[in-house]
């Protein structure tokens, strides 16, 4: 993963102790809805968190969505203490004991601490744990949405400069990984919701995407025709992976080395998909040979630029299929392949990860997931996905998806 760190600080992946929440699910367990916004400058997908009791002037914070994150809400300490309802978690409390074995005590303040990794830092952070009331949007089967208020365990870094690499557009992260203090696990434990994420990333800043936690709320034709493959969960880090057997461009197969089961990571903080160096070179070579667009000079960080002048993309751009374990194919059309750089110039939206990606051969980034319905069902160990919603004249940025 060293190459990812060198390419983008955002690619550094979280690590946390994994602990599955237990409990029998109610037939009508709530489905939580987080509207998603795409930041144009950083390509981050974020959601707003209302922190504090509604009767005590709650504060709104923008938090980046992190599928591998281990903290339900990671914010700066000078931010969380501004809430009048925030309470630190004490060292001898039951919540602190649940944070073991990677918990500790800040003796001077008798505050419970926990080591938390974040995609914005290379090493785990020693954080202080606290609890506060948050406002959560729930979605009913009839489409009605209402706000509910719930306690949530939060974390903040002891070092005030620990999150200095975090873009200013966000105040922290919302972690959704398979770990005991992630948002997914806390909601499953407190509200008996299903351990399932349904994600629809918007492709345009003007539109709202959506993230649902719980039983999938969709009943339309899109959700009924999802393809699936086994979801691989790293039981040490809580990160999510799938098995990609090969890549197909037209009739040409680009093989993967299959260094391990779960050779491809799913990461919303990576703006674009990153490939191990030799796979990337083979992909670019085959794409260039199949496209009908004229190649032009490269500009970093991408290595395949084309002139789109007078070209109809649907006819000129070959599709790229990810062939998955079980035989399903995840198709990328031109919308998830080409990045517009300037007028009449586009580039292939994949990045070269070099030779130091020792175990992961590919990191699927946000751009390749935009306007696809994606589901991660931890209880069924299943990863499901749709074709591009644009083929059905809709998108993640339209209200019909939310």
Image (cartoon, rainbow, N blue to C red):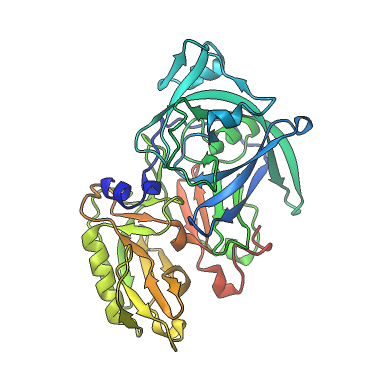
Q: Residue at x 29, y 76 (%)?
A: 297
Image position, residue 73 (x, y; %): 55, 35
In the figure, is residue 281 to the left or right of 377? left
The C terminus lies in which quarter of the figure?
bottom right
Residue 308 falls in image quadrant:
bottom left
Q: Residue at x 77, y 51 (%)?
A: 144
Q: Nearer the viewer, residue 168 or 119?
A: 168
In the figure, is residue 227 to the left or right of 192? left
Whether residue 238 is visible here, answered yes or no, is yes
Kindly give the residue lying farthest to the bottom in the view shown: 310
Q: Residue at x 46, y 43 (%)?
A: 166
- Residue 20, compared with residue 327, is above or below; it is above
Image position, residue 13 (x, y; %): 38, 42
Tally of numbered tags? 0
Image position, residue 215 (x, y; %): 61, 47
Q: Nearer the viewer, residue 313 or 138?
A: 313
Whether residue 333 is visible here, answered yes or no, is no
- Residue 384, compared with residue 139, is above or below; it is below
Residue 253 falls in image quadrant:
bottom left
Q: Residue at x 41, y 29 (%)?
A: 125
Image position, residue 94 (x, y; %): 55, 15
Residue 196 falls in image quadrant:
top right
């Amino acid at each position: 993963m060293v190459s990812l760190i060198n390419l983008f600080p955002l690619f550094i992946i979280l690590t946390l102790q994994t602990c599955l929440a237990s409990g029998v699910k109610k037939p009508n367990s709530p489905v939580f809805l987080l509207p998603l916004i795409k930041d144009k400058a950083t390509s981050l997908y974020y959601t707003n968190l209302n922190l504090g009791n509604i009767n005590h002037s709650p504060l709104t914070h923008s938090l980046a969505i992190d599928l591998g994150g281990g903290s339900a809400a990671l914010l700066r300490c000078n931010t969380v203490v501004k809430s009048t309802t925030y309470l630190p978690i004490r060292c001898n409390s039951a919540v602190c004991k649940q944070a073991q074995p990677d918990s500790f005590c800040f003796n001077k303040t008798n505050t419970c601490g926990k080591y938390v990794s974040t995609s914005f830092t290379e090493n785990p952070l020693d954080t202080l744990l606290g609890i506060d009331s948050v406002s959560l949007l729930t979605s009913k089967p009839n489409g009605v949405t209402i706000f509910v208020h719930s306690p949530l365990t939060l974390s903040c870094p002891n070092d005030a400069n620990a999150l200095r690499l975090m873009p200013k557009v966000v105040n922290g992260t919302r972690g959704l990984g398979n770990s005991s203090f992630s948002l997914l696990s806390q909601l499953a434990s407190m509200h008996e919701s299903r351990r399932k994420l349904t994600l629809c990333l918007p492709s345009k800043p003007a539109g709202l995407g959506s993230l649902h936690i719980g039983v999938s709320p969709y009943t339309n034709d899109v959700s009924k025709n999802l393809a699936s493959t086994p979801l691989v969960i790293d039981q040490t880090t809580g990160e999510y992976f799938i098995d990609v057997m090969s890549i197909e461009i037209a009739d040409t197969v680009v093989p993967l080395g299959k260094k391990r089961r779960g050779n491809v990571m799913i990461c919303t903080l990576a703006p674009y998909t990153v490939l191990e160096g030799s796979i990337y070179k083979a992909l670019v070579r085959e794409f260039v040979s199949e496209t009908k667009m004229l190649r032009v000079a490269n500009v970093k960080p991408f290595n395949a630029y084309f002139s789109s002048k007078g070209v109809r993309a649907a006819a000129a751009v070959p599709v790229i299929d990810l062939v998955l374990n079980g035989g399903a194919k995840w198709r990328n059309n031109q919308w998830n392949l080409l990045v517009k750089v300037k007028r009449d110039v586009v580039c292939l939206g994949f990045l070269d990860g070099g030779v130091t990606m020792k175990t992961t051969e590919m990191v699927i980034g946000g751009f390749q997931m935009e306007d696809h319905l994606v589901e991660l069902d931890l209880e069924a160990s299943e990863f499901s996905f749709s074709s591009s919603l644009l083929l059905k004249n809709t998108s993640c940025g339209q209200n019909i998806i939310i």
